[in-house]
Amino acid sequence: MVLENIALFDFDKKTWILIAAAAIAALLLILYICVHFSKGKRKGRAAERKVGKFIKKLGKKDHIRIINNAYLPLYNKACEVDHLVFGRFGVLVVETKGISGKVTGSGKNLTHTIGSKTHKLYNPQMQNKTHIDNVVHHLKKGGFDKVPVTGAVVFSANDIEFPSEIGTDLKGLEKLYCSLRDAGCNQDVLYNYFNDMQVRNPLKKAWIKTRKKND
C-alpha cells in the first residue's frame, strides 16, 4: 500500500509538472500572438522589411549576405538582431526603428513624442551596442577575431525627428555602407557561421518577442 501511494504521488507530481509546462507554453503563445498583432509590432515589422529590402538592394553588386531577425545566443538566453549584414567589409549590425514623431534627449532613456503622447524610449544606440558586443563575442569564439564589426541604428519613417548622434535615415545608411572598406572577409563563411548558431526554440523566440520594446 505504501509503495502504491509513493508511485501515485510520483505520477501526480510528473503530471503537475507537465500541466505547468503546458500552461507556461500556452501563456507565452498567447502573449506572442497579442504582441505580434499589435499595431506597434505591425509597424515595426513593416519598417524591418523596408530596411531589409533597402540593404539587399544596396549590396546586391557586392554579393552581401543578410540574416533578418537573427536570434543569437546570449549567455543562457538569446537576443534578436534586426539585420546582420555580411560582406567583404565584415559584419554590419543594424537596429531598425519604425517610429514616427520626435525623439529628444540623451543617455540611457530618451523622450519619444508623437502627437500629444510622450513616453520613454530606451536609447537604440545602447540597444545596438549589446547586439554588437554579442556579435564580437561570437566572432572571437569562432576564431574570427580580425573581422571588423560596424553598427548602425536606422530610423525608417519619413515623419520622424531625432538627434543625429542616436541614429540615421536610409540615406545615412547608404553613406555608411559606401564608406565600409574591403577587409577581405568571406561573407558566405560568416553568414553560415551565424546562421548555424541561431536559436531555433520557438518558446525562447516567443519570450524574446514579448520582452522586446520600442520596435
Image (cartoon, helix red, strand yellow):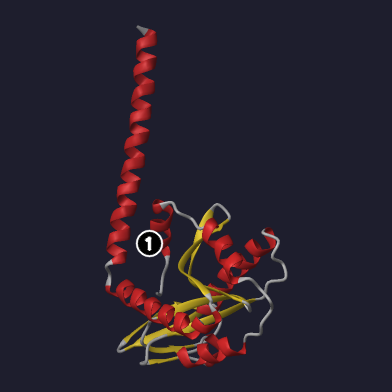
Q: Nearer the viewer, residue 157 or 5?
A: 157
In this rendering, position of residue 164 left or right of residue 101: right
Viewer can see residue 123: no
Disc 1 residue type (three-letter): Thr
Residue 79 higher or lower than 162, as above or below: above
Quadrant in which the N terminus is drawn: top left
Residue 99 quadrant? bottom left
Q: Nearer the viewer, residue 214 or 171?
A: 171
Determine the residue positioned at 42% across, 66% down. 212
Residue 142 higher or lower than 61, as above or below: above
- Where residue 60 appears, as percent x and y from the top left, is 49, 82
Q: Nearer the viewer, residue 11 or 1?
A: 11
Residue receiving disc 1: 210
Answer few, some or many: residues within 10 Å of disc 1's Cα (few below 14, many 20 plus, some between 14 and 19): some
- Where residue 87 appears, as percent x and y from the top left, is 59, 76
Viewer can see residue 21: yes
- Where residue 92 appears, as percent x and y from the top left, is 57, 77
